Amino acid sequence: MALNEEELIKIRRELHKIPEIGMEEFKTQAKLLEIIKSFPQKYLKIKVWKTAILVRVVGKKPDYTIGYRTDIDGLPVVEQTRLPFSSENPGRMHACGHDIHMTVALGILSFFADNQPTVNMTFIFQPAEENASGGKQLYESGVLDEWMPDEIYAFHDNPQLPMGAIGCRQGTLFAGTCEIHARFIGESGHAAFPQYAKDMVVAGAQFVNQIQTIVSRNVDPIQAGVVTLGHFEAGKTGNVIAGTSQVDGTIRALTQEMNLLIQNRVRKVAEGVAATYECRLELDLHQGGYYPVENNAQTTAAFIEYMKKAENVNFIETRPAMTGEDFGFLLSKIPGTMFWLGVESKYSLHSEFFAPKEGAIIKGVKAMLGFLQARQNGVIVASNNK
C-alpha cells in the first residue's frame, strides 16, 4: 500500500535528523534503502552508485521510461528551529528542504511499487546537489545506462508559495550558475616604497569595480544576468603592500548562452587587470553541472495542462528565479520539467530557521501521482508549441 500522510511525516522527520553534506550521505542512503526495501519488491530493481540510489519500476509495456529525481544532501548550516526532530548532526541541516523532496519521492515510489505502472519508471535519489554537481557526476558515470529516462521530472520546495501549491512555467525556471575565483599575484613591499612593489589591493579593487560594468554594458537589457562578488581578501596589516588578493563570487543567468557570455567578459576583465598591473592571474570559472533549469516545451505543456485542470491542485504560474539547481544539467540531456512545491514558511531556503509546512508533502505526492499516471497512460496530449 502507498504510504499515508502520517507515515510520510514520520519519514520526513527521521530524514531531517540526519542531514549530510554531498557525497557523504551514508546514513541518509542507508535510511532510504531501508524504507525502499520495505515496499513490495515485485516490480522493483535497485542499484547503488556511491551515495546515490536508483530504483527501476518495471512497467507493463517497458518500451519507454519516465524518470523522477530527488536530491538527498543537506547544507553546512547550524539548525536553530528548536523542533523536536532537529538535526542530530552538528553543523548540518536540511535547510533547503531536501528532506521534503525525498519524502515526496518515497510516497510516489511506494504507490508504484504496489501498482505496476504502464511504462518503466526510474527513480533517482541523487547526492551532492548543493556542492558537487551530483546530477552531472551521476549522469556521466554511466550508471543510468539502460535505465536512462526518456523524460524526467523533479521539484523544489518554495517557502513563498502557499502550502501544497504547484508552481511552474514554460522556459527557464532557475538560473544557471558559475563560481568565480580570481587570485592576483604581484609583489609585497613596504608601504613607504610602492615603486618597489606590485600592489594587489589596487589590482583586486579594479577587478571588483570593472566587473560591475558587465551586466550594465554587455548584457541585453531585456535579458537577465547577475554578477556578485561576495569575498575580497588581501594583505595582513596597514603598512605592508599586499602581494596577493583573492576575489570570489558568482554568476547567475537564465540561459546557458548568457552565462557563457558573462564568463567570457569576466575572463577578459581579469586578464586586462593582470596586464595593467603587471601581475600574475589565477582564474577559475567553475560552472560544473549548474546549468539553467530550462523546462522542455512539450513535457511542461502537458504538466501545466494537467495541474490547471486537476481537482484539489492550486496551480500558480511562476516567474524565473536566480537560484541555481543541478537538475539543469539533467534537463540539458533529457527532456523534462522542474516545478515548485509550496511549503509556506516565513523563513527562506538555506535559513537556519527554515521550517516548511509538512502538509505540503501529501499534496505534492497526490498531485504528482495523478500527473504521472495520466502521463504514462496517454491521457495528456502535449503541445508542440515551442
Image (cartoon, grey):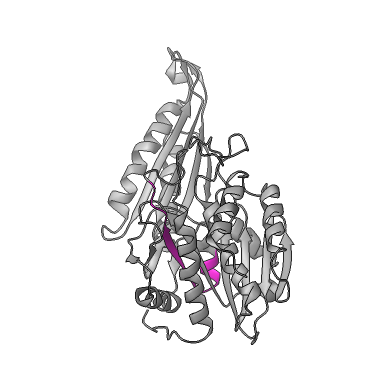
| Quadrant where the image shows the N terminus | bottom right
Residue 364 in magenta?
Answer: no
Image location (x, y in percent) of residue 38: 71, 63
Q: Is residue 102 visible?
A: no
Q: Nearer the viewer, residue 351 or 198?
A: 351
Measured along the vertical axis of the image, is residue 236 above or below residue 43?
above
Q: Nearer the viewer, residue 367 or 349?
A: 367
Measured along the vertical axis of the image, is residue 127 above or below residue 38?
above
Residue located 45% across and 70% down the image? 367
Name the image quarter holding residue 353: top left
Image location (x, y in percent) of residue 207: 40, 38
Q: Is residue 91 visible?
A: yes
Measured along the vertical axis of the image, is residue 109 above or below residue 322?
below
Query: Which stretch is magenta?
Result: 330-345
Image location (x, y in percent) of residue 208: 38, 37
Image location (x, y in percent) of residue 123: 62, 68
Q: Nearer the viewer, residue 279 or 302?
A: 302
| Quadrant where the image shows the C terminus | bottom left
Residue 337 in magenta?
Answer: yes
Judged from this view, the residue extending furthest toward the left is 221
Residue located 59% across and 71% down the image? 111
Residue located 61% across and 34% down the image? 90
Q: How many marks?
A: 0
Name the image quarter holding residue 309: bottom left
Q: Nearer the viewer, residue 256 or 161?
A: 161
Residue located 54% across and 54% down the image? 9
